[in-house]
Amino acid sequence: MEGKSVRVILSLWILAVAVSGSVVLGEPGSIVLPSGWTIPRPQGMMTETGTMPQGAAASPDGTALAVVESGFNPPALGLYRTVDLKQLASIALKGAFGRPVWLSQRHVLVAGANADALFDVDLVTRTVRAIAMPNHSYPAAVATIDGRIFAVATDGDASVRIGTLTNLPKAKPVHVGGHIGGLAFTPDGKTIFVSNRASDYVAAIDTATLAERRIRTGLHPSGLLVTGGTLYVAESDADSVGVYDVASMKRLAGVFVGDRSAGGRLAGVSPNALAAKGDTIFVSLGAANSIGVIRNGRLVGRIAAGWYPTDIVPVGNRLYIVNGKGEGTRPNPYLSRLSSNYYDYVAAIEYGSIRAYDLSAQPAGLGAPQGALGWQGSPPDTVVRNDGPIKHIFFILKENRSYDQVLGDVSEGNGDPKLTWFGARVTPNEHALAARFGLFDNAYASGEVSESGHNWSDAAYCNDYVERVWPVIYGNRGANDDTLSGSGAAVSRNGFIWQVAQAAHVSFRDYGELTDTPNLTGSGTSHAPSLEGLYDPHYVGWNLSYSDLDRVKEWRREFDAFISHGTLPQLEWIWLPNDHTYGSRPGKLTPAAYVATNDYALGLIVHAISHSPVWRSSAIFIIEDDAQDGPDHVSDQRTTMFVASPYARGGVMHAHYSTVSLLATIELMLGLKPLSTYDAMAVPLYDAFTPKARMQPFDAIAPRVSLTTRNGTNAYGAKISDALNFSRPDANPPGVLSHILAHNR
């Protein structure tokens, strides 16, 4: 995998099984996700849920499923009939997280998260009784053993409280640390196991004495299951299921449930939940869109799921698969409308789903999971190779724009000009880059929002912790937001692209990503330990009052020095955030001025590189972190993507590309190992390049709109914008900024 012009084609080993009597019958073919991966259309029963269903449990008699729906939209407890997946009820909750617990056929208990409570839901009267927990405790998981002993995990103080349902609020907290991902009692109730998602251990707590013992696991344990005398641990960033003897607490085995290539194990299937049926263990593989099947201590196959499964519930001969992101993306052409339900906002329309599979219809023996099917040969004359002519790569990340919003006015592409807010007049350089180096009209941001989008851009991956919590954070119900901390629970096994670059002895320089340099009064810092010594401490990161043109001046200062001394890093990561805009806040630049500033800054960077001695050996890759603040008639994750290089082929390219496609291409050019299964599987941009260099430099186009025009007090949404929070990306209520931009473009 190192420096070779090849990419592994991986098999997901999907086994779709039909179920009769479905609510929604699947159609032939498959659904293409933003990453380029596909999921099969449901072949049996399927129903839609609310946003990001986090966990589910079957009623004592098996006739109903309770589903905790806790994503961007207001949380609820969904109740679904198992025989046909008909929704029986949707009961609104003030907060919710984790798996529900059935107290009886009539009552369900839910951890109330931001509500600092547990909720006892009466399914007959549809009423909710709140059991108050301490302030800022943030209950994130709850469990019981036969309704006698209860445990609640409180994320606010990283602790577990154990007791009866009535005395839980006053129970002594046992500090576990990190973010708790799962709870599981032993059958006798004497021990409860608690996973720490931010580390690599499970705490075993004596329920009588509260004595704690820590059991070492794979990285970032999440879901737990105790069956018989065995503890199973979903080790989400180790791609394994740990198997432990309950009595001795010794590790018996580690079942690898991930993918392999000819170069070894790849990272990135995110095992996140466990369930048992007889001697079979099912593990939800969120990032692999499948369910792993474990028998006799080994993975024997996978069952196809929807998009990002978060839980599984076996009932009789059926397996109910809860999918956090449902059945694929949707277009969002009406995003500019402001309404109470955030009409057409990406996180508001990313509904979950439940699929049902008939286990009795599966063939006896699921067979061994397949790894690599073979090698995908690269074109014989491609420049996308480690020993090719490209030696210097610049990756530029921008903020929140969709394809139609910027390039919908380009007639050669699949655009809708009615949705173009910042067309050629505002973004002449982006339009010129597309005309000169290639128009990509089928490119997607791998992440939906900044929290996930920056993780995808940095790591070619977004792990289970981030995927589960960002919708809650954006729904304004989160606790401590550490999804972009560069450390702890949010960091996947292989870390970030600068880490694999260091491992391959590829020089790297960061400009703005995961750094804190709000102004030029002093040197900046980074909260990501892995960036130590790799970033420009004078490059201003997130600060919308600071111009991208000044960022380019600082970048240019180092660039010219590197060129002069022959020390230009092989890989540079540059953040240009001005196209996020300040809305219509009085006194700040207008949205058009912000976007035009960003466009001109981008043009100046390409201008500088293309007029330098390293142009012949350079490739510049440009993409948005997400497309959340723009409408699009194809997909709410379609965005703008550009490639600038003497070897760029040019023309219109309709091939499906994404954030991870860019990273895969960069890795091949620089001889880097893939960060995850996603960039290992991604289709590189072979077709975007030609072996013949065209050395004509790119000349930045001067702005066609004023870069100094500021919002007046009468601008549309001025009062709203004045009250908004621009201290970090996406700090404001989603949808509000896009609505303001739609009226101020």
Image: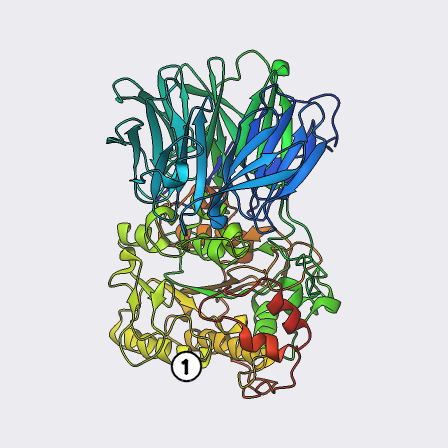
Label 1, secondary structure: give it. Answer: helix
Is 558 situated left or right of 429 in this image?
left
**In the displayed structure image, the side of residue 567 where residue 640 appears, left or right:** right
**Looking at this view, is 236 or 103 the one in front?**
103
The quarter of the rendered structure image containing the N terminus is top left
Question: Counting other residues with Cα less than 10 Å from the Cα at mark 1, is it few (<14), some (14-19), or many (20 or more)?
Answer: few
Establish if 144 lies above or below 379.
Answer: above
Vertical relation: 76 (above or below) 412:
above
Where, by quadrant of the figure, is residue 362 drawn?
top right
**Residue 106 vertical position relative to residue 650 in the rendered view, above or below:** above
Residue at point 56% right, 66% down? 437
Q: Is residue 498 left or right of residue 370?
A: left
The percent position of residue 63, horizontal first and vertical second, equals: 65, 22
Residue sitting at the far top: 364
Instruction: Give the amino acid type for the residue marked by disc 1 in the picture.
Output: Asp
Q: Is residue 542 visible?
A: yes
Quadrant where the image shows the C terminus: bottom right
Query: Where is residue 16 drawn, in percent x and y?
Result: 62, 25
Reading the image, the residue beneath label 1 is: 550
- Is residue 661 visible in the rendered image? The answer is no
Q: Quadrant of residue 571?
A: bottom left
Q: What x and y, as percent, mark residue 75?
A: 59, 46
Give the colour scheme shown: rainbow
- What percent of the width, then of the height, locates residue 313? 55, 26
Counting every numbered tag in the picture gives 1
